[in-house]
Amino acid sequence: MRNIPVIILALMLFTSCSENKTVVIIANEENFRIGFAKERLEKTFVDIGFQVSLASTNEENTKDVLTISITEKADKTNKEGFKISSAKNSINIQGTDASGALYGVLELCDRIEASGEIPLDLHIQDKPEMVLRGTCIGLQKTEYLPGRTVYEYPYTSENFPWFYDKAHWIEYLDMMVENRYNSLYLWNGHPFASLVKLDDYPYAVEVDEETFKKNEAIFKFITEEADKRGIWVIQMFYNIIVSKPFAEKHGIKTQERTRPITPLIADYTQKSITEFIKKYPNVGFLVTLGEAMHTIDDDVEWFTETIIPGVKNGLKELGITNEPPIVLRGHDTDAKRVMEAALPIYKNLYTTFKYNGESLTTYEPRDAWEDIPKALSKLGSVHISNVHVLANLEPFRYSSPDFIQKSVKAMHSIQGANGLHLYPQASYWDWPYTANKTSPRLKQIDRDWMWYQAWARYAWKSNRDRFDEVLYWTNILGDYYDCGKSGKDILQAYEETGEIAPKLLRTFGISDGNRQTLLLGMFMGQLVNPFKYHVYKDFLSSNGPVGEILTEYAAKEWKGEPHVGETPPQIIDEVVNHGKLAVKAIENASTSIKANKDEFQRFKNDVYCYDAFANYFAEKVKAAMLVLNYKYSNNIEDLEKAIPFLEKSVAYFTELTKLTKDTYLYANSMQTAQRRIPITGSNGTNKTWEELLPHYQNELDVFRRNVDMLKSKGNDGKGLKEYKVFEPVEVTILNENIKRFPMKRGMNVYSDNDAQIEGVAEELKRLSGVQFSDKKQQENGTVLHFKTDKSVNILVGYFNTNSYTVLEPPTLETNAHANDRGQADIKIANAMLISGLYPVNVYSYRYEPGEHKLILGKGRVLILGFIEGDEDIAIHDAGLNNLEDGISVDWLFY
């Protein structure tokens, strides 16, 4: 290895009483990062009162001159590392590469700025633990653009005015380098049509000529400024998505889950990637194969025969051999198969996978959140843990250093990760702003500075002493608010509130995905019968320590069985206590605040919001436990006892509404039909607590009414609720040799399987199903080709099981198009019993008049009939589940 002199700084320090202090900097700035480091040093000395001048040669060292030398000593096994050592008249900084030298300079600058003095007795050595430490920005919007669907957002000043703001980028990139982040992910569905032009497909560009030139200029600016700071820009895109003008030219959809790879689309995509690499060779890629790809075989083919060749072709045309990083996202694909096929042809590969799904729930991930990332980490490349979306933290401030540190430790020890990919703490879809109702609007990097700083600190080094960390953050917060030792109270408020949302979601949630906004609450029906809302299959076993969900706890209580792990009563007691302690801590700090007073008041309000929410949820869970007990006791007194708890819950939610009405624009930044829990977000609705409050009040009123009805009729609760019987709509089935079957007991649902209907909900009895081959469904999937003169809802039956033989129901966690036709939620749970098979849940797909194909994947599924497209289907549980787990109770809230 050789020493490469990069910069020599001669600092002429005058020890006399004179205030004339001069710094002479002698530098070789051939490397951009070293040049940036020199500028950073220059600013630091100017700020502490030095006059700075430059010289082209080294000055002779004397007793009055302090020399700071910075060198690179190449060490590929210790990338980004550095050493700093000092003697009486010299400070030596040695980096293992240019980034290491930069970080060494930043470390020295930080120490000078903190103390106001030049450290002359310093001997440290440091390097980061995580290989890639990155943040992300979404070039996406809170709502769909007209005529477009999910992820389709061209780079224009109308869509993203901030994208063209150079001052914004400098501020953001400076934040990144100060926190030692080294990668920036830009998320977009199909960025190529905004950034490159193709000779073979000139019509594919999505922006006008003026915008295209602006895009070229700003993207070049971003990548060059990032490179100065040691930051890789990594462009993300989804597959298979094509530009809107390209799709219109060829009469296809921009994206279609069931579409196979075609030569045309493959050629267009590969050439787009090649042109992108030629124009921006220092930019990497993050590839999402899932959500818009048809099969795993297609994933492998697309990655190895389209994406990687596109990159290599671009490098070849440039005469470059240094491979930019390609990050394979493990989401909705078989990453093992893909990586095994890709590594022999491309070496600079990484994998990434969500840490706790699209939320933050635990530092003790298990099951899928342990097994999948651990397997990815063993594929021969670095694995990156992705802290993704944070749907359960929106919109309040969250920056618990203790929770974050433990999470980073879990990434290393449990998941095998050695990289961090960090989403904004909240408002991902509304970058660069927060949801706070202020004028001007708050920027995320200003409000959530502590979020970025905490994750970066532990990505650099996770095993820091807890006592030291409390002292560190106490000082950081004490300085920020100029409140001295009261910084410790503010830290406690962060750490107490930091436990509330994670504990509640992992215990009571439907999903760790962004289809649930936890801090808008949940309905009683979702608490007492969560599986009707399609609990994501790996959610309950993955997102926290061993524990019990509410329905499980209630059943064990009734049967007198022992409980295991975290229990619902334990969790609600804990979160209420967390809220109480947080309020006490923030009040203790209130009288000491001398700086950033407005921000302190906003954080204080967030603490009170968390406290109100914890109490709201706790009272609702207490009510739900009594309702679930009624399943087994059939004692109306249990329901009567639940009413006061539900009343208290509404009162606390009313308080939360008051706290947020004038302080927040919304709770969640994804304001589309993809959001389903607690209620649909279609057309940007139901995004505030004020909008949800009437729903929760109505839920209480309905519950009171149904309890009174039970009391007046002396009914045992079984079969009390009646629902409208659906009238069939005639459609023309265009499949060949297809038969229909009436929805009656004893009828075969398959043409080649003896499975028969044993029970069917009254609502379905006038309909007739479409009989398919069981074998062909499992081998090839299901395609229903039909024509209709009026709008219709197709009722589709998905089996309520995790068996590999059945088709999984529509799931927004893995398919962004899973609600395009209103199919994301169960409409009737336990609507059929089939001999030898499983209970059936009914979903609906809405189609307008015309000729269509309903294309479903491989696995057993039932087409149960056709009803009016405008039919209002009351979501409920038909109870055809052999009643092994007591009577159905969620009807009490409808």
Image (cartoon, rainbow, N blue to C red):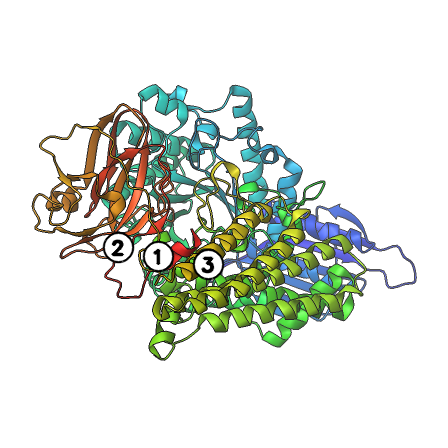
Which residue: 23% across, 55% down? 839
- Look at the numbered disc 1 and give the secondary structure of its residue: helix
- In this picture, is 326 found above or below 403? above
Which residue is under mark 2?
A: 800
x, y percent for residue 587 = 73, 66
Question: As drawn, is 568 to the left or to the right of 176?
Answer: left
Q: Nearer the viewer, mark 2 or mark 3?
A: 3
Q: Any mark on residue 708, and which?
A: 3
Question: As drawn, is 613 to the left or to the right of 111?
Answer: left
Which amino acid, mark 3? Asp
Q: Earlier in the sequence, mark 2 or mark 1?
A: 1
x, y percent for residue 482 = 78, 62
Which amino acid, mark 1? Phe
Q: Tag count in the figure?
A: 3
Residue 77's quadrant in the figure? bottom left
Which residue is under mark 1?
A: 531
The reply to whether callout 2 and callout 1 are in contact (CB within 8 Å) is yes
Categorize mark 2 by other alpha carbons within 10 Å: few (<14), some (14-19), many (20+): many
Which residue: 36% across, 68% down? 634
